[in-house]
Image (cartoon, rainbow, N blue to C red):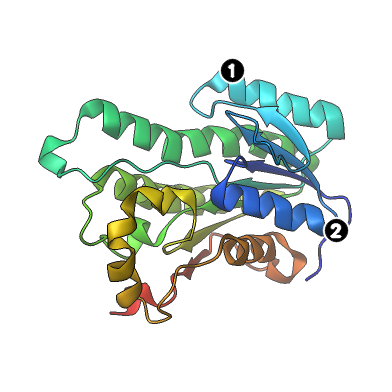
Amino acid sequence: MAWPEGAVVVVTGAAGGVGHACAAWLAERGAQVFSLDRREPADVVGTFVAVDVLDEASVDAAVAAVVDAAGRVDALVAAAGISEEPTPAEEMSAATWSRTIGVNLTGVFLTCQRVGRVMLGQGAGRIVTIASMSGAHVVNNPQQQVAYNSSKGGLVAMTKSLAFEWASRGVRVNALSPGYVDTPLLGSKHELHDQWKSVTPLRRFAEPAEVAAAAAWLLSDEAAFCCGTEMLMDGGYTLA
């Protein structure tokens, strides 16, 4: 995989799960990684920068810190995301809806917008948003998660819109939509793991490193003709 040595990469949601795996994968291959999250993990990859993706001033400050330190931003992996506890739609609170949409959609937009401004000024950049098979391909079963599904569906549409607007100015934007990934996000739903695996043709969850490798490919030169692409990697879950 062609990956520029020393490329400056920003990863949000880098304290754990897919975000941390992406940061580690890229750093191991020579990228200069800036790990952005609300809290600093014990095993931070690269340089940690605190950010609250729901706060415009916080996002502005985090992006400015990266540019001050590195002089540019070559790539962004927007992996910050949350999932609400399964709740019937008719019982979901407005606060839960707003927070889920806020982090998963508005927060990703603010991050992409601010980093995108830097990339547009450079005339080059690569962005991958971490969406989900739940966004446009499946309504999960049996858990009811209307806010999460809606946020990820919106994220796919947003990714395509940004790709269309920015491609002619040198910035590629694509989405990666995993199925179930073996991360702490699934930890509270152990009773459903066997059911989810049983209807996944590969009979397992994705490893975070597998998702990281796919994200890195979308950022790489090999994916230079991918523009507004949504890469689905679900182990065959949505085939049924």
- Who's the residue at 58% across and 45% down the image? 16
Type of the residue with mark 1: Ala
**Label at residue 57:** 1
Instruction: Determine the residue located farthest toward the top in the rendered image.
Output: 57
Instruction: Determine the residue located farthest toward the left in the rendered image.
Output: 90
Q: Nearer the viewer, residue 193 or 5?
A: 193
* Residue 40 location (% of width, % of height): 65, 31
Type of the residue with mark 2: Pro
Q: Which quarter of the picture shows residue 226?
A: bottom right
* Quadrant in the picture for the C terminus: bottom left
- Count the marks: 2
- Who's the residue at 64% across and 23% down the image? 60
- Who's the residue at 51% across and 37% down the image? 109
- Determine the secondary structure under disc 2: loop
- Contact between marks 1 and 2 (CB within 8 A): the answer is no
Q: Nearer the viewer, residue 51 or 113?
A: 51
Instruction: Determine the residue located farthest toward the front in the rendered image.
Output: 191
- Who's the residue at 40% across and 78% down the image? 203
- Determine the secondary structure under disc 1: helix
Q: Nearer the viewer, residue 53 or 228?
A: 53
Local crowd size for mark 1, using a 10 Å CA cut-off: few (<14), some (14–19), many (≥20): few
* Residue 112 location (% of width, % of height): 59, 39
**Label at residue 4:** 2
Q: Taking the image as drawn, is residue 157 in sight? A: no
Q: From mark 1 to mark 2, how far is it between C-alphas?
A: 31 Å
Q: Earlier in the sequence, mark 1 or mark 2?
A: 2
Local crowd size for mark 2, using a 10 Å CA cut-off: few (<14), some (14–19), many (≥20): few
* Quadrant in the picture for the N terminus: bottom right
* Residue 229 location (% of width, % of height): 53, 64
